[in-house]
Image (cartoon, rainbow, N blue to C red):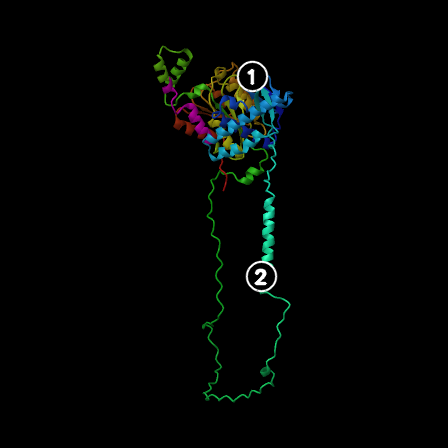
């Protein structure tokens, strides 16, 4: 893999860090669904030089040349056509991919960025490669096409309008004449003197006995009838049930007031040894590793059957992925998490810190880890621990490292216990816990030097139990108060 270019990166810009994390998640999502030629159009970013730059890499071989620097216009057009074909292939592949809601939102947000005219396009042996600028996408502006109406249609509507106006005028003239006022003739009978109306005396009613009112006062207990309705009672809002919070919960105010919250790095073993099943005894696993190193006299059929048995599910890797992703959900929201991956020699790969909002991307990245034999494989644990410790403070705040591995470093002869003692002396508030899948206690010195603990997990049930203990011991799994 060669580096095409490097671009200055502001590691303190949370938006840019989030975009970098999203792009890496997109790369992992698309890789298994695209052909190598189509996937080669997307350059791979890696933070380099103490996170001050992003290096853009590709598996293509040859001299990278900027597309805009090509002098031959026909050559430029040819590359641009190839670029459009690669993008079309990506879009067609996405339509066939079984995506969940989160993955679909990720793809929808990044397709415009892949097509953006603001990206840098390099050419390597006539193959285009996109260098994403992480800026707002710049897409070509397409002018709206306004269809022209034939001219005769305007005359058609004009003639109809004139005919309608003429018809209305004729109807008005015939049925609503104007200018004529009706002459009102007074009624001679109505013009007479006003008649005198003589009222006849009304007969007096028969005299009724008059009852003198008594000077009595109604009793206080007697209700007085009234016609006014009684006011209806005002409905009271239902009382919210009180939430009983656990005694060790952390409030949102407490998280917001902490200007320098702790951070954590997960050192994850992604080497070939992690493909071994958890359903075999440690002695059987040790025999399998000897077989991989020295071979055997088994027939081809026996060899295939043996390897299938020793790599059947659940494997060390599949169980570690499952437990790690579920444990991430238990870590309190104000803790930033970085992933340090041990895949092959000579060096580990380091991700930026994922905030709480981007933890789904972190879990997606862990689920897509795949061991490789490139470069001979290996477990660069020394390098991974060294990189993880440099990312963390461990002096002014409590920081944490969680190592998930099945063995020791086989990429260097440097003493990892010496490194652990140095880290403990330089960063006394950095604590390291270990989930040891092999149970061989070969790297216990790392935890012992930093005040951490070692948890042995050699079965799927042990894995869940010991991982929960390892996270709980770090005291960063406080739930948020409701």
Q: Nearer the viewer, residue 265 or 191?
A: 191
Q: Residue at 58% x, 36% y: name it.
A: 258
**Magenta-colored stretch includes residue 59:** no
* Gap between marks 2 and 1 measured at Cα: 87 Å
* Res. 281 visible in picture: no
List the residue tagged with mark 1. 61
Give coordinates of residue 68: x percent, y percent.
63, 23
Q: Which quarter of the rendering shows the N terminus?
A: top right
- The answer to whether the residue labelled 2 contacts the one labelled 1, judged by CB atoms less than 8 Å apart, is no
Which badge, 2 or 1, comes first in the chain's sequence? 1
Residue 406: quarter of image: top left
Q: Secondary structure at mark 1?
A: loop
Q: Residue at x 48, y 80 (%)?
A: 216
Query: Magenta residues, as a range?
Result: 307-327
Q: Which residue is mark 2?
A: 171
Query: Could you say where residue 306 lies in the image, as x and y percent from the top left?
Result: 36, 17
Residue 27 pos. (x, y %): 52, 26
Residue 325 falls inside the magenta stretch: yes
Image: 455 above or below 229: above
């Amino acid at each position: 893999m060669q580096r095409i270019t490097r671009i200055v990166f502001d590691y303190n810009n949370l938006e840019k860090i989030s975009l970098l994390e999203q792009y890496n998640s997109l790369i992992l999502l698309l890789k298994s669904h695209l052909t190598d030629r189509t996937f080669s159009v997307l350059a791979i970013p890696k933070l380099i030089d103490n996170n001050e730059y992003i290096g853009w890499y590709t598996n293509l071989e040859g001299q990278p040349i900027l597309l805009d620097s090509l002098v031959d216009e026909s050559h430029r057009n040819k590359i641009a056509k190839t670029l459009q074909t690669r993008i079309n292939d990506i879009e067609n592949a996405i339509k066939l991919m079984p995506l969940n809601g989160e993955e679909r939102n990720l793809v929808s947000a990044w397709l415009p960025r892949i097509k953006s005219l603001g990206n840098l396009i390099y050419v390597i042996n006539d193959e285009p490669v996109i260098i994403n600028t992480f800026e707002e996408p710049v897409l070509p502006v397409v002018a709206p096409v306004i269809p022209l109406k034939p001219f005769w249609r305007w005359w058609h509507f004009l003639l109809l309008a004139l005919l309608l106006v003429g018809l209305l005028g004729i109807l008005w003239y015939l049925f609503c004449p104007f200018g004529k006022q009706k002459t009102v003739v007074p009624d001679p009978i109505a013009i007479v003197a006003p008649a005198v109306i003589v009222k006849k005396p009304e007969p007096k009613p028969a005299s009724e006995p008059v009852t003198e009112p008594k000077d009595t006062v109604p009793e206080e207990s007697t209700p007085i009838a009234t016609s006014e309705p009684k006011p209806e009672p005002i409905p009271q809002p239902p009382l919210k049930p009180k939430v009983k919070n656990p005694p060790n919960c952390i409030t949102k105010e407490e998280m917001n007031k902490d200007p320098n919250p702790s951070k954590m790095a997960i050192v994850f073993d992604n080497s070939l040894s992690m493909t071994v099943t958890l359903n075999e005894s440690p002695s059987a696993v040790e025999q399998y590793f000897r077989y991989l190193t020295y071979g055997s006299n088994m027939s081809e059929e026996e060899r295939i059957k043996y390897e299938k048995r020793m790599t059947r599910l659940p494997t060390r890797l599949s169980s570690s992925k499952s437990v790690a992703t579920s444990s991430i959900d238990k870590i309190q929201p104000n803790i930033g998490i970085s992933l340090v991956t041990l895949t092959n020699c000579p060096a580990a790969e380091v991700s930026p810190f994922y905030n709480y909002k981007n933890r789904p991307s972190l879990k997606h990245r862990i689920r897509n880890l795949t061991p490789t034999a490139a470069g001979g494989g290996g477990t660069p644990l020394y390098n991974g621990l060294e990189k993880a410790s440099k990312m963390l403070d461990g002096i002014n705040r409590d920081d944490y490292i969680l190592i998930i591995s099945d063995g020791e470093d086989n990429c260097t002869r440097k003493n990892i216990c010496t490194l652990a003692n140095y880290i403990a002396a330089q960063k006394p508030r950095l604590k390291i816990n270990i989930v040891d899948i092999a149970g061989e206690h070969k790297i216990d010195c790392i935890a012992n030097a930093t005040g951490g603990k070692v948890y042995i997990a050699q079965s799927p049930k042990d894995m869940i139990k010991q991982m929960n203990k390892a996270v709980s011991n770090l005291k960063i799994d406080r739930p948020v108060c409701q």
